[in-house]
Image (tube, grey):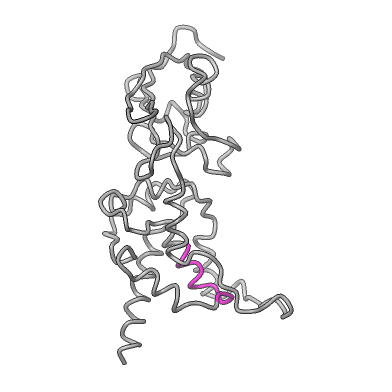
Amino acid sequence: MSDPSNSLTVSVHRSGGAGHHFEEFIVPAYESQTVLDVVSWIQQNADATLSYRFACRVGMCGSCAMMVNGVPRWTCRTNVSKVINQGRLTIAPLRNLPVIKDLAVDMDPFFDKWVEAEGYHHPGRNRSEPIAEIDPESDERQVANAGIECINCSVCYAACDTVTGNPEYLGPAALQRAWTLLNDARDSERSRILDAVSGVGGCHNCHSMGSCTAYCPNELDPMSAIAGLKRETVRGFFRRRG
């Protein structure tokens, strides 16, 4: 039920062309209201030109991720009551990515980092050969499975201060994907992955601050995956030297 006496003061990032600013809206407060509900209310009732992204509304796609009071979150899964600060909300686009307009960011740099990290499967068999058998209980498979639920929402990328300070850094999502493939027995390019993640923008740039793990909405652990890559790249270096 809505309460007419209750309202929220919401500052929303607006941009277009070369300029940007924050615009304030007064939004009615509802029980069990999400931040995405707030953004949708503004677009539907106050300013139809507001640009933002969303799709599933149930925490499956990750496309509604934004900065909420300075923290990257899925807005569809963020209840206003848990983040409101003295009756106010500040909503902005994800950090570390170019802003297209208002709350919508350009995801190309994020996905380009996946390609740079060799974050795609390198098949070792052709289509005429039988599918490789994998033991789901093996330690290697368990490690690979630990990061497989990443849905590319870029929350970890927005949370990462290393990305902010170093545009060449591949970022936690791309590196976690590389770690997943490194531990997948079906991937045939282990050395290629290690070469990709040990370069200028690779895993050794990580300062282990842990924001990626702290803010992952799927409770994944990119920091541990990056630590694994650090170990394997060092081992690979000494194996080659030997």
Does the magenta portion include 33?
A: no
Q: Nearer the viewer, residue 163 or 221?
A: 163
Q: Looking at this rendering, what residue extends furthest in the bottom direction?
A: 242
The residue positioned 37% from the left and 56% from the top of the image is: 171
Q: Quadrant of the N terminus?
A: top right
Taking the image as shown, residue 33 lies to the left or right of residue 85, namely right
Q: Is residue 178 magenta?
A: yes
**Is residue 23 placed above or below 67 in the rendered structure?**
above
Horizontally, residue 123 falls left or right of residue 217, namely right
**Where does the magenta region start and end?**
177-187
**Is 182 on the left or on the right of 198, as rendered?**
right
Relative to residue 145, is residue 19 depicted above or below?
A: above
The spot of residue 105 in percent (x, y) is: 43, 39
Residue farthest to the top? 5
Judge by depth and name the residue closer to the eye, 165 or 138.
165
Q: Tell me what residue is drawn at x 33 percent, y 27 percent.
A: 20
Where residue 116 appears, as percent x and y from the top left, is 43, 63
Percent coordinates x, y for residue 78 in the rendering: 47, 34
Quadrant (top left/top right/bottom left/bottom right) for the C terminus: bottom left
Q: Residue at x 36, y 27 (%)?
A: 90
Residue at image coords 45%, 76%: 192
Please identify the residue farthest to the front as the structure is shown. 17
Where does the image place residue 76, in percent across and percent down from the top left? 52, 34
**Foreground: 10 or 104?**
104
